[in-house]
Image (cartoon, rainbow, N blue to C red):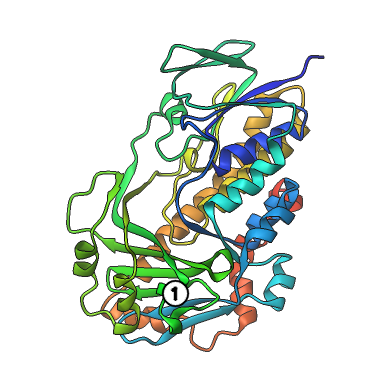
Amino acid sequence: MSTQSAIVVGGGIGGLAAALALTRQGIRVQLLEQAAHIGEIGAGIQLGPNAFAALDALGVGHIARQRAVFTDHIIMMDAVDNSEVVRIETGRAFQERFNGPYAVIHRADIHGAILEGVQHDPLISFHTSTHITGLTQADDHAEVTDEKGNTYRADIVVGCDGVKSVVRQQLIGDPPRVTGHVVYRAVVERENMPEDLRINAPVLWAGPRCHLVHYPLRGGAQYNLVVTFHSREQEEWGVRDGSKEEVLSYFQGIHARPRQLLDRPTSWRRWATADREPVGQWSYGRATLLGDAAHPMSQYMAQGACMALEDAVTLGLAAAQHKDDLSAAFKLYESLRIPRSARVLWSTREMGRIYHAQGVERAVRNSLWQGRTQQSFYDALQWLYGWNAQNSMSGIKL
């Protein structure tokens, strides 16, 4: 029997993880990336224990651990009065409960860890500067076309081409849901970070219709800063340079301690965010979706990359169960991933509401977790952080 083949569209975290998962099943992969180089832009991301379970299943967890910063806590502060709302300890008890750490890492470092696991595999070939414009399917193969007119053929296609996925547009054609929330991201050097905020944790400052998050990167040499607010404008989905003046205009009435952070970045990038409504099907014939192409979500639970990694592991395991029928593997994969990713997406939207509470909602929010034990926090997070490769295929309730 000839070696089965796949086209993976997109060379980000999800695309590389998908390629790694498929090559581990003996499937030959052509990875198509529209950028000129296989790399990752952006700043920091958070990785929960479920992400490390996925990275371990892909054989690259040890590389990611070497590059990550393991945090001591996850903290939410009230940005108006500088009071602590909740603190979840992420030390030994947390790691023993979920069999993995909570960490923060630069996007380029996690991307590089996965790339190391796959780049020398003889089953993978990389095609850069390749922008896909079309997808067609036949009884015995699938084919994609790029903007230069080149065609690529394989048994299956996996669309890992992000929030503006061309593959999704071909398969589903649904519109994005522009959230009206704007995200500013910046990286601050350690010496420019206020000393009392050099905290080894993701710290979220929750304000009225706005919040900001900071956490260390690269051993504390840098800090990732993410600022979010409900825009007054009619937003269009996209990225552009931002302005400090706009950010400050949304953070009136914020306590001086978090507000001082807004003066620190030397440049900002501005994202008008979008997600999509969950769908009941994202696999059609010989094509499927993965990561942000399948279930783009906002950043409020820091699970976007984690979900892509889980997707990749599940896809690989489904392919192992259906070696002779990858379309059947796709059906198994989506039956497991659609309910879980939808739950995370809907939970993420609700967390955005909680973070941005004002008035009476803020008072209720600040009382939600009073008196809770660490054990009760861990119990509440079990469904999310308890995922691993072993239980991912059973459909059990975590």
Q: Is residue 1 above or below residue 179?
A: above
Q: Quadrant of the N terminus?
A: top right
Tell me residue 147's x, y (percent). 41, 18
On the image, which quarter does residue 332 sit in?
A: top right
* Image point (74%, 65%), residue name: 99
Q: Residues within 10 Å of mark 1 (few under 14, many from 20)?
A: few
* Image point (45%, 59%), residue name: 348
Tell me residue 230's x, y (percent). 26, 61
On the image, which quarter does residue 116 sit in?
A: top right
Residue to which mark 1 is pinned? 191
* Residue 210 seen anywhere in this rendered image of the structure: yes
* Image point (24%, 44%), residue name: 236
Tell me residue 324's x, y (percent). 76, 22
Tell me residue 66's x, y (percent). 69, 60
Three-letter amino acid code at the position of disc 1: Glu
Q: Quadrant of the C terminus?
A: bottom right
Q: Is residue 39 above or below residue 352?
A: above
Q: Which sits in the foreground, 138 or 185?
A: 185
On the image, which quarter does residue 351 sit in?
A: bottom left
**The residue tagged with tag 1: helix, strand or loop?**
helix
